[in-house]
Image (cartoon, rainbow, N blue to C red):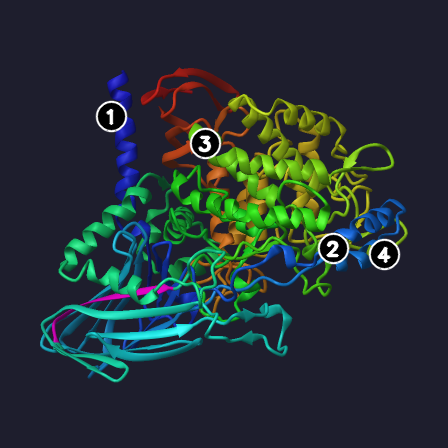
Amino acid sequence: MMRVFFIALLVSVYTVATAQENNALKLWYTKPATQFEEALPLGNGRLGAMVYGGVDKERISLNEATLWSGGPIDAAKVNPDAKHYLKPIREALFDEDYKKADSLAHFMQGPYSEAFMPLGNLFFDFDNKGNMSDYCRELDIQQAISKVSYRIGETRYTRETFVSHPQQVIIFRLTAQGKDKLNFSCHFDSKLLSRSSVKQGMLQMKGWAPVHTEPNYRGNIANAVVNDTANAMRFVSMLKVLKTDGRQKLLDSTLSVSGATEVVLALSMATSYNGIDKNPGKEGKSEDSLAAGYLAKITNTDYQSLKNTHYADFRKYFNRVSLALGDSENEKLSTVDRLNRFAAGHTDNSLIALFYQFSRYLLISSSREGGLPANLQGIWNESVRPPWSSNYTTNINAEMNYWGVETADLPEMHRPLFDFIARLAKPGHITAQNFYNASGWVCHHNSNMWAMTNPVGDSGEGDPCWANWPMGGVWLSTHLWEHYAFTKDEAFLRDQAYPLMKGAVQFCLDFLTADKKGYLVTAPSTSPENVYITDKGYVGQTLYGSTADLAMIRELFVDYLKSAAALNIDKEIQTQVKKALVRMYPYRIGKAGNLQEWYHDWADNEPHHRHLSHLFAAYPGYTITTAETPQLADAVRKSLQLRTNEGTGWAITWRINLWARMQNGERAYDAVKKLMRFVGQDAAIKYGGGGVYANLFGAHPPFQIDGNFGGGAGISEMLLQSHQGYIELLPALPKEWQTGAVKGFVARGNFVLDYAWEKGQLKKVKLLSRKGGTCKVKYKDQVKTLRTQVGKSYELKF
């Protein structure tokens, strides 16, 4: 019987994997992109490209992850008087003078974040003669390669593009099959200060980022973009022909090829970035040497070898997980057609599975070890003043990017976030002292590549509900424990995670203060970007003891205690944390049956607000769970009902995850459907809110990549949970997903699950234990306990 079971399981897994070898893992279109939200993204964590797929003119928009405006920040010089306002604000708050507290909060602000910059564009101008037919543009997310093909006359033209992580270059291969040949020219352009030239047998563009950019939401203000080439981040792009059977010509700022049946080009890019404490202009690295060095390493490498190396690297990560949900017959349709059908009410579970795998694709493409974490747009941005500066917004968005990373078996892609947290801790220590007279370290709601930790607001212009939020470091630090909980990497916990968590804990211990009833609360406090109405009718932002603050601190404290106990260190701090936990203001259920967002049972100025920060304890935290705190879980459900499933792209994904945690598959799937609403010029039904664009990018709108990552996390949360001390299979399965199979989802404890279900019923389960130990696996009302050994697999039947 055991042999029969494993054969059946292997057949199921093979079926999933085989389906995903074909059209199941492709985005494809019948015409070129005309705007950013239709172009197809490629990336290797450092280099980003958007492929438009034009016929007469091809556009490749380019990004390099370290190309930011600005430079090093001296945290000690950012509003050194801010701490003097802490006591007056607290006095105003505990006197219930919220208007005065709101006014004083503006004195505890600093400058805005700098922005992620677009490097520019590479254009191909083709000398085509005749009418085009048989056009196809596609992105294979399993191979991480873009392909454009079409016919003109008797000749088939094909272009392949990929961004190689091992070689750190972008590779293009153009071919012509038929009687006509390839004839084209290439040139660069950029919205930044730049100049193009021909040098050393290559087409080059050199340029400078601004030294300052104002956020786009500040509008058309003076000096919104400031240039200073002496202190600016420099960049270079170099395009080189690796192989052609045609004629190559370099002249002025153009590279031309004529009479070719094949051309292989390599594009290398680099900046002068030399760390967050080095002036990129005066102390920067040689961007020319870096870019030329990447090209030198591949000059004598053939295209197939480059492609094979790229495939092997990417698929090493991507192929760890497979997901099938049925409806494979829809894969014969173009992506636009599928999106329009889905928006019209037709089921397309294979499209949901594609969206999930696309979220994994984007993470592998935008967050690699040794580099920067994915920002608000991943690594794909075409604007000098991008939406919200394309920065790290830590009151939800930066964290949401990494919600699903561990279950998706991509722990390596989490590490850039941890390195970023480590860089924040040093300036964050200074900010904690200067703003709150506190030890440890703190980060507020915006940061950037330069590890900015101060409150933003242009030193007084920002609304406190978003500018004066000091929980960024607290929320980020919970990711450190989550990585350990999934991987059981003790060296990581000891050497990297614990010291950072400890610093965030020390800040919280100092920042918490007693209210009039003796409870420990935060003051000043906000609930990110939301506004309350007091019982006296005042519409305000600053308060004491918001539920969101206290939920995040509780989560951090609980995580810290587990970490310190595992390492058997810092008994004195453990005691302080335990005492603080007992004294913290408890969660409260309001008169509507909801989980209170505010210390008092106040109304929301915007009842359907997009943020759900007060529900943090239910997701991504888990100090509120369906098993341990059922009454509070009911209050979370009521809050979700009051907020509704409507919202912007990323806000809908938070609702998916919360409904999944509340184990309501139908509500979660309703939010999935809303997330997948087609937004764009080819949408048959026009929506005013968030959804997805033609290229499946998340629509806030505008584009924010957190909707992709949060949506992927929500889909996996519907199918697997492990936060309540046991692994639960299919905890929020909607009726639409009657048949499916998962291969490779990871649960806390580093257990890998393969399982399948038919007609809504679990059929087979295989569990691999990477670290050993005891685990419990639950399905419906059945719980099985396994005592596992390292590296061994186990089969379960329910």
Residue shown at 32% from the left, 44% from the top: 318
Which of 313 and 798 lies nearest the eye of the viewer?
Answer: 313
User: Which type of secondary structure does the marked residue at label 4 adopt?
Assistant: helix
Image coordinates for residue 616, horizontal then vertical, percent? 63, 40
Distance CA(mark 1)–CA(mark 3): 29 Å
Residue shown at 28% from the left, 45% from the top: 315
- Above or below — where is 209 with respect to 463? below
* Residue 647 visible in this rendered orientation of the protein: no
Crowding near the residue tagged with mark 3, few <14, some 14–19, many ≥20 C-alpha atoms within 10 Å: some
Q: Earlier in the sequence, mark 2 or mark 3?
A: 2
- The quadrant of the picture occupied by the C terminus is top left
Crowding near the residue tagged with mark 2, few <14, some 14–19, many ≥20 C-alpha atoms within 10 Å: many
Q: Amino acid at mark 4?
A: Lys
Mark 4 sits on what residue? Answer: 99
Q: Amino acid at mark 1?
A: Ile
- The quadrant of the picture occupied by the N terminus is top left
129 lies left or right of 238:
left
- Residues drawn in magenta: 260-271
Disc 1, disc 3: CB below 8 Å? no
Q: Earlier in the sequence, mark 2 or mark 4?
A: 2
- Above or below — where is 165 with respect to 780? below
Image coordinates for residue 98, horizontal then vertical, percent? 85, 52
Mark 3 sits on what residue? Answer: 486
